[in-house]
Amino acid sequence: MVVERPTLETVWGWLDTVPDPEIPVISLTDLGIIRDVQWQDDTLEVTVTPTYSGCPATTIINLDIETALRGHGIEKLALKRQLSPAWTSDWMTDSGRAKLEGYGIAPPQPAGGPQHCPRCKSTHVERISQFGSTPCKAQWRCTDCLEPFDYFKCI
Amino acid sequence: MSDNLFEFLCRMGDNTLVLGHRVSEWCGHAPVLEEDIALANTALDLIGQTTLWLDLAGEVEGAGRDADKLAFHRDVWGFRNLLLVEQPNGDFGQTMMRQFLFDAWHLSQLNALMDSSNTQIAAIAEKSAKEVTYHLERATETVIGLGDGTEESHNRMQAALDKLWPYVGEMFTLDDVDAAMVDAGIAPDPASLRPAYDALLDDVFAAATLTKPQDDFGHQGGKSGKRHSEHLGHMLAQMQWLQRAYPDATW
């Protein structure tokens, strides 16, 4: 029996719908951690890079990719880890940034801090801590509406 | 050569493992919630880096040991971490002083390793350096904030510096393993990192109103594994008890 291999475009489309386990409003492709998808003969090879080396979501992410692709009938699958070039928040897509902001998390900015409060849009914000509820986030506060919020760190 | 490379990788991985465990001891005990989260995140980064270093060490050794085996199935004399990182947490100030003294060395070591002739080492260094940049930034701010803070916080930070200073020298000593790494273009000569380290410390301590101790005596024996302090065994007893009680348990 000859089964037609799905095109790479189709596979990328499937991966677009796999949510990040910690921040489910964005997908793994929004996050920019899927670096490559290739067919090696009849094996589908997916290259993934971790956001932070100790991020506990990494193993869940690999499991979610595997589950999703197996669900679409991929039988031979290889997940490759790539460390270099190291992940940077610059790889996050524009739609990912917009979704983060809509969710209440300020997207990463090259200036090193949020552009404005994701709720009231005031630019009067202050840092509470460089670290937050996940390795990729820091805690900030709006000095106008006084709401604390997460900022997705720029690395 | 592969023996020396294994030793070197254990040094990198044991530093991050032992410090990562030490810092994680703060989880749920830090003075304020934000610091608790920051400490736990720092520990998490360090443990993540440990996995990368020790998995590679196991691969180089070729004896079927992975990061978990190396972390949980070696005893004190098998560890190659610096004496600095195994020192007890003390108060929050002492923990942050230890972090600063280590981070300042760690970041320049990682920056140098990004040019390593070994591409796997260069990749781990590239990944780790981004995280450690954050660690150093936070440790620097905290050392300055507490050093130049109240009389109480200043005194505690000066006491922490005085206590930990004798463990700084070991980071910059050269032994046969280091020399083999330098010859192979894998890692920098430890002494070459000292001038920039001293310059950074001078700047930070000036801002923190802290005085660097005059005496440059440095305890040795951590990275060679020959003379760990008594603290490491107690830490391992806690860290390894599950694998010792139930060898090879998984979940």
Image (cartoon, grey):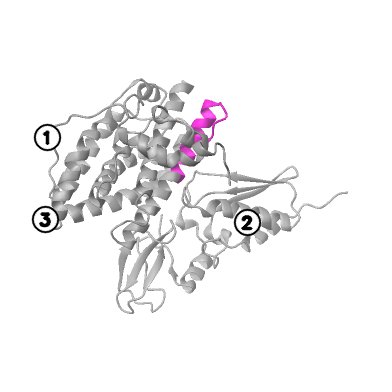
Counting labels gives 3
For disc 1, the neighbor class at 10 Å (few under 14, some 14 to 19, many from 20) is few
Residue A29 place in picture, x, y as percent = 57, 59
Q: Which residue is mark 1?
A: B214
The magenta region covers B48-66
Residue closer to the observer: B146 or A36: B146
Instruction: Name the residue rendered at 41%, 41% in the picture.
Output: B238
Q: Chain of mark 3?
A: B
**Is the same chain shared between marks 1 and 3?**
yes
Same subunit, tags 3 and 2 = no
B10 with respect to A11 (left or right): left
Disc 3 marks a residue whose amino acid type is Glu
Residue B29, quarter of the rendered image: bottom left
Q: Secondary structure at mark 3?
A: helix
**Which is in the foreground here, disc 1 or disc 3?**
3
Which of the chains bears the disc numbered 1?
B
Name of the residue lying farthest toward the front: B245
The residue at which mark 2 appears reads as A64
Q: Secondary structure at mark 1?
A: loop
Q: Answer whether residue B65 is magenta in the image.
A: yes
Residue at the spot of label 3: B151
Chain bearing tag 2 is A
**Could you say which quadrant of the image residue B221 lies in?**
top left
Residue B228 percent across, percent down from the top left: 32, 30
Name of the residue lying farthest toward the right: A1
Looking at the rendered structure, the kind of residue marked 2 is: Asp
Q: Is residue A54 above or below residue B122?
A: below
Q: Which residue is at 75% across, 49% downward?
A: A75
